[in-house]
Amino acid sequence: MDSPQDLHDRARRRIACRLLPFIFFLYLIAMIDRFNVSFAALRMKTDLGFSDSIYGLGASLFFVTYVLFEIPGAVVAQRWSVRKWTARIMLSWGVITILTAYIHNAREFYAARLLLGTAEASFFPGIIIYLTRWFTVKDRARAIAAFYTASPISAFVGSAIAGWLLPVHWLGLSGWRWLFIVEGLPAVVLGTITLFYLTDHPAEAQWLPEAERAAIASALAGESAARAKHGSLRFRDAWKDSRLLLIVTGYFFYILAFVTNTLWMPTFLQRLSSLSPATVARFVMLPAAAGVAGLLLNSWSADRSGEHKWHAVIPILVGGCCYMAIAVFAGHFAVALLLFTLFYLFSTAAFPSIWAMPTMFLSETTAAAAFGLINSIGQTGGFFGPSIVGLLNDKTHSIQWSLAFIGSSILASAFTLSFLKSVSPIHSESLHLQGPVAFEPDISS
């Protein structure tokens, strides 16, 4: 007769094989559609007469509505259905991405970005909520990494598609317009499939044998009980908790730097090299590939050791140092490209550990709102960063100050997160599974 641990291990493998590849593709399409404007801008700005300030503001406006609807959307997903809410999100953002191909002026560009932010809001925290319903603490960072790997891969895939489409002119439409059309269609298709493929809770999973459903449900219930025993917080109290505030602040600086770099890196590389848009798009594939490697290696190490603080702080710190060096070596394109690649290698690696931390001290319901809070405040950096870079570029007629601004932000993230102090891990008493450590602030370090 199979032991509870054997049943749990089989359930873990079956769940991972069924859910993670599909969620990976959902997030891949999300990231491609969110940031394809960075590649489109290589030609769109010239065709439509946009300055850096206009592009920077338009790219940033996505995050205004994204932030406004993030927390309400996360709560809706948690209380209603992550499956149905995710399908709605994907269908709406796919349609809006396609319609962006037909903009002709700055006002239409601004409107398209605002609508896209509204459509995509709460997708990410909804997926985080979904993973906490299926994966125990022991596996959570790797589960987050498995789907978040889609982010650096999206830059790789998106740059390849941009390199193919930017030079074309089909049916009277420029290549940058086809970029939005071709990349918007998969969201519509996958949004429809989501309704039939995903399952909201393990108890509803007919594709799991009954014994395995019971085993995974027991493991998750044990962890929930352990969190309650150790003092899980309500949301009205959680937002006052210094642990959560430190994570929110660190994530704000992290996202400010990372999103701003993503939206501007193709432009930076073009100005550092004077290469064609299609060639620049292909060069972006190098940092993207490095980001995938860093993410997988660091998440494996974090789950193996059960430590998350330094698996976040050290990669972010090293990535920030690399980015600050880009301004120094801006006259040497090969060195600058190497530093961009190292920045992606290290900074992307920290992401799963950042998101694993809040699950150590928050209940499921509280976590739903907290994920929305962390992501919404973090994503406000996505508004300020790109628009500030656009203004800096136009005012200084150089990218040096912009590079220093982004590098300083990523270093501020490492500094903020360094004040978290590791404490004893929470155990699941039912299966004796040890998870990653929880955190509390250490203002003396």
Image: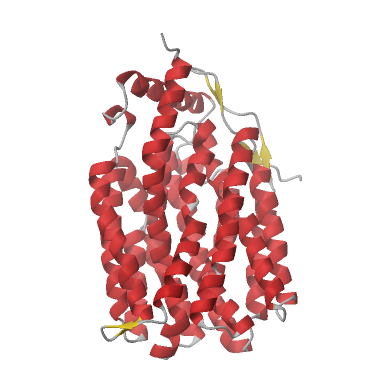
Using the rendered image of the protein, determine whether residue 190 is visible from the camera's viewpoint. Answer: yes
Residue 241 is situated, as x and y percent measured from the top left of the image, at: 56, 43
Quadrant (top left, top right, bottom left, bottom right) of the C terminus: top right
Asked if residue 63 shows in the view, the reply is no
Quadrant of the image occupied by residue 190: bottom left
Instruction: List x then y, in percent, for residue 132.
Output: 43, 37
Q: Position of residue 427 (x, y in %)?
A: 55, 24
What is the x, y in percent for residue 140? 50, 37
Give the residue displayed 32% in from the left and 86% down from the top: 104
Q: Residue lying farthest top?
A: 1
In the visual, does 164 lie left or right of 269? left
Image coloring type: secondary structure
Q: Could you say which is closer to the camera, residue 95 or residue 221?
A: 95
Residue closest to the eye, 152 or 358: 152
Left or right of 341 in this view: 196: left
Residue at image x 26%, y 66%?
A: 95
Given residues 370 and 150, the one toward you in this image is 150
* Residue in the foreground of this view, choosing between 298 and 399: 298
Total number of numbered labels? 0
Q: Give me the residue at 55% from left, 52% from top.
A: 248
Question: In screen coordinates, is 395 left or right of 225?
Answer: right
Q: Which residue is painted at 67% across and 52% down in the image?
A: 315
Q: Is residue 38 above or below residue 376?
A: below
Position of the N terminus by quadrant: top left
In the image, farthest residue toward the bottom: 49
